[in-house]
Amino acid sequence: MSRFMKTLTSNVHFYTAQLERAPIVIFVDNELTGAGVIEEITQDSVKVRGEYYMRAACTFKYAS
């Protein structure tokens, strides 16, 4: 089953994507703002390609 464009909504989704090195895309207000592999996860943010994205302000989806 494809995960393409499935939203990452829980810690399990984020940590699974990080462990699998699955590419994700990041949206703010339906505008694509970033893409890549998760480098770091905190309670408040996700680091992708050296940039921190606030979990409360962004939507994270699988890119593949």
Image (cartoon, rainbow, N blue to C red):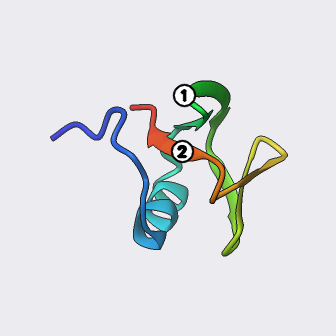
Compared to residue 10, the image places residue 8 above or below, namely above
Q: Is residue 8 left or right of residue 39?
A: left
Q: CA distance from mark 2 to mark 1?
A: 8 Å
Residue 39 in the image, given as x and y percentages of width and height? 70, 55
* Residue pointed to by mark 1: 30
Residue 2 in the image, given as x and y percentages of width and height? 22, 37
Q: Amino acid at mark 1?
A: Asn
Q: Residue placed farthest to the front in the image?
A: 29
Q: Secondary structure at mark 2?
A: strand
Q: Residue placed farthest to the bottom in the image?
A: 43
Q: Give the total of numbered labels.
A: 2
Residue 47 in the image, given as x and y percentages of width and height? 74, 54
**Label 1, residues with CA under 10 Å away: few <14, some 14-19, many ≥20:** few
Compared to residue 58, the image places residue 20 above or below, namely below
Q: Is residue 11 left or right of residue 2?
A: right
Label of residue 11 in the image: none
Nearer to me, 56 or 19? 56
Nearer to me, 17 or 56? 56
Q: Amino acid at mark 2?
A: Thr
Which quadrant does the C terminus fall into? Answer: top left
Point 29% across, 40% down: residue? 3
Q: Residue placed farthest to the right in the image?
A: 50
Q: Residue placed farthest to the left in the image?
A: 1
Point 53% across, 49% down: residue? 21
Q: Are marks 2 and 1 in contact (CB under 8 Å)?
A: yes
Residue 35 in the image, given as x and y percentages of width and height? 63, 32
Point 54% across, 44% down: residue? 59
Q: Secondary structure at mark 1?
A: loop
Point 15% across, 41% down: residue? 1
* Residue pointed to by mark 2: 59
**Label 2, residues with CA under 10 Å away: few <14, some 14-19, many ≥20:** many
